[in-house]
Image: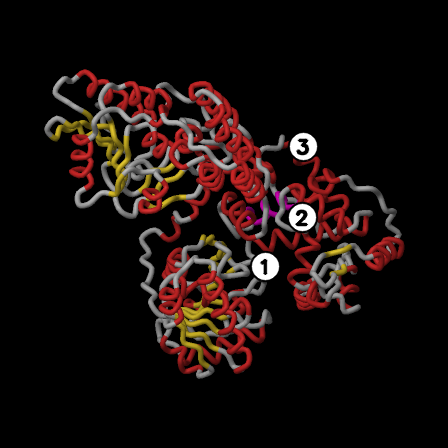
Amino acid sequence: MNQRITLERNGPVALIYIDNPPVNAGSLEVREGLLRAVKQVESDSQLIGAVLIGAGKMFIAGSDLNEFGKPLEEPQLPEVIRAIEQCSKPIIAAVHGAALGGGFELALGCDARVAAPGCLLGLPEVTLGMIPGAGGTQRLPRLVGIPKAIELICSGARVEASEALALGMVDAVAEGDLASFAVDYVRRLPDKRRIRDMNTPASDSAQIEQARAKALKAGRNRPQVSAAIDAVLDAATQPIDLALAAEREVFQRLRLSTEAFALRHLFFAERQSAKRIELDGIEPRSIERTAVIGAGTMGSGIALAILQAGLPVVLLERDEAALNKGMERIRADYDRRVATGRIDEARAEADLARLHASMDWEQVSRAQLVIEAVFEDLTVKQELLRQVEPLLDEEAIFATNTSYLDVDQIAEAAKHPQRVMGLHFFSPANVMRLVEVVRGMYTAPETISTGFALVRRLGKLPILTNNAFGFIGNRIYAAYRQQCELMLEEGALPAQIDEAMETFGMAMGPFAVADLSGLDIAWRMRQARSHLRDVNMRYVDIPDLLCEQGRLGRKTGAGYYRYDEQGRRNEDPRVTELIERESARKGIARRTFSPGDIVERVLTTMANEAALLMTEGVTTRASDIDLVLVNGFGFPKWEGGPAFWSARQPLASLKALQQQLAAVTGAGFIKGDLAMFHHLNAFSQSDAATA
C-alpha cells in the first residue's frame, strides 16, 4: 500500500498492518494507505474479510497531533472509516498496546474489535481541548450507553481490555497469538456488523443528568466538555449522518481554538521535558534502596510515592512521636485507597511491608539514595548532611527537598558535594506529579541523571533546573505573590484578587493559598533573607503584621480570611482595616482594580520573571516553565502556562505592560528580555502544534 501500510494474506483473510513508529500515530500516510488497502480487499474476490492490526507494540495510540494546528489534508479519518463501513466484506480491528483517540475511532468503525490482554482503549480528545471528531461521540454510546459514554469521553479515561469487554467496547479478548485469533474471528463472522446500524440503548434520564453534572464539574465547565456532552446526547436523538456531520464541525472548530493549542503545547512540552541533551550518554545508576529523613507531611508523602512505585524505603526520624505520626499518615492513605477500591488489601500490605520506620540512623547506610525532608532552615540541613554523610555508602546520593534554600550552600557541608542534588517535591508529594530536579554547581552529571531517572520511575514529571533562589516555580510564584501584595496597598482586597485569579482558572487565589500553607512559612523565609533586601525597594508589611497578630492562616482560624468551624473562608473587616491603614501610612492613594487589571498584571509579572530565569540560565526551556506552573502551582492548563500566554501577546503590548509593571514596582525591578522570550515561544496558528 505504502511504507506505513502493508497487506499480507492469511488464506482468505487480509492482515492490514499499520507501521508508523514509535506509536503508530494516525498520519496522512497511514490514512492514505488504509484507504488503498480497504479498496484492495473489496476488489479481491479471493478475500472474505480483513484484520486491521498494528505492527510493533501497539494498534494506533492516537492521531498525529502535529497535523491538528494546520489545515487537515485529505483523506481525513472519517473518509477512511466510511470506506470500511461501506466495504461489503467484514473488517475487524485487532487491538494491542493502545487504541486511543483516532485509533479507537478507527476501531469503532470496524465490524468488530478483538483485543490483546492488557491493552488500553479510550478517547482522550477532550483533555486536548477538542472532542472526538471521527464518530467517537456517536459510535461509543451505541455500545456502552449514553451515561457511560459521557463519563468515558469527558474524562478521557483509558479502559483496560477486560473492562472494555465487560462494557461492550470490544467483542473478545484474544487467547494466544492476536493475529491468528483475529483471522479466526473474521472467518466466523457471518456478515457486516456496523455500529452505525445499532440503536443507542435507552438510558434513565436521571442517570444521564448525573453523568452530565459530574462531567461538567470535573471538567470545570470547559467548552469542549459541554460540546462533547451535547454530541453524545445527539446519538440518542439525531440520525447518525446528521450527528456525525455536527460532531465533525465542532471538532474542526475546537481543534483551532486557543485552548486546544495550549493543551497540545503542554502535551508536546511534557514529552520534550524528558529529553535532556545534558544527560545524553550519561547512564543513571539503578536505585533499588532509598531512605527518607523526616516523617512530617512532606517526608511521609515522599515515602508514600516511593512505596507506590514498588521500591523499599527507610523512614527516619529523631522523635518517636513524629515517626509514629508519619506512619499513621502513610497507613491512613493506604486505608483510604483500599476503602475506595483503588487498590486491594493485598497490594496495600505488600507496599507497607517494604516500609521500614526507624530512629536508628545507622539504617541510612542501606540506602543508595537519601532524600531529606526536614525543617526548611539552611543550618539544620547542613548539620543533617554532616551527620548523615559518614553513615552513607560511598556512592550514595543525598538529595535535599528544599523549596528555596541554596543547594550549593547545603552541598558545601559535604565531603563529596558531587553527590548532592535537589529533588523538590510538591505537597502532597504522593499526589503531585511535579518534581524539580536541581543541579548545583558541584553536582555530578551521573547524580543528576540518576535523580532524573528515579523521579520518572516514581511516575512523576521531572523538570531539570539549575540552582537559584526558588528554582523555577517558587521564583515565579514569589514574584506573583509580591505583585498581589503590592496591589493590596494600591487598592485591591484579598478576596478581589483571589476571585479574579480563580475566575481566570488558578486552582486557588494567592491569599487563599497563603492561608492554606501557613503565613509563617513565607514569613520565616523573608526573615532569613532580610539582610539581602534592597532598602529602596517597596516592601509590603501586611503579611508580617498579620503574622505578628497570630493570624497564620487556616491552622489558627484566621489569616487573610476568617475561617468558621466548617473551614469556610470569610472576609474579615479587620484585615480590610489593616490594609487601608497601611496604604494611608505610606501615602498611597487607593484605586479600583478590575478583574482584568489584576489578571493582566499577574501574567505580565510571570512572563517577566520567566524571561529572567531563561536569561540567567536557571532553565533553558520556556516550555519547562509552563509545565512547572501548570503542574505545581495550579496555573490553568487551558491557558498553556505563562510562556505560552506571553508568546501570544503582541510584543509591543507586552513591553508596554512590562513598562507599567516596572513603574508601579519601583526600585529593584529588573526587566526580562521579552523580545528574546517571545522569539523562543513564537506559537502561531500554523506551528503551535510542533513547538
Q: Is residue 297 left or right of residue 530?
A: left
Name the magenta segment's main secondary structure.
helix
Residue depth check, mark 2 versus mark 3: number of the one nearer the observer: 3
Q: Which mark is residue 29?
A: none
Q: Which mark is residue 653?
A: 3
Circle 2 crowding by C-alpha within 10 Å: few under 14, some 14–19, many from 20: few
Q: Is residue 420 left or right of residue 91?
A: right
> Which span is picked out in magenta?
605-615
Magenta stretch contains residue 160: no
Relative to 167, say whether 328 is above or below: below
Measuring from the top left, give residue 267's x and y in whole percent: 45, 41
Reading the image, the residue beneath label 2 is 670
Residue at screen point 23% across, 28% down: 5
Relative to 605, say whether 512 is above or below: below
Q: Which mark is residue 469?
A: 1
Three-letter amino acid code of the residue under disc 1? Phe
Three-letter amino acid code of the residue under disc 3? Ser
In the structure shown, which secondary structural element does the residue marked by tag 1 occupy? loop
Measuring from the top left, give residue 4's x and y in whole percent: 25, 29
Residue 440 at least partly seen: no
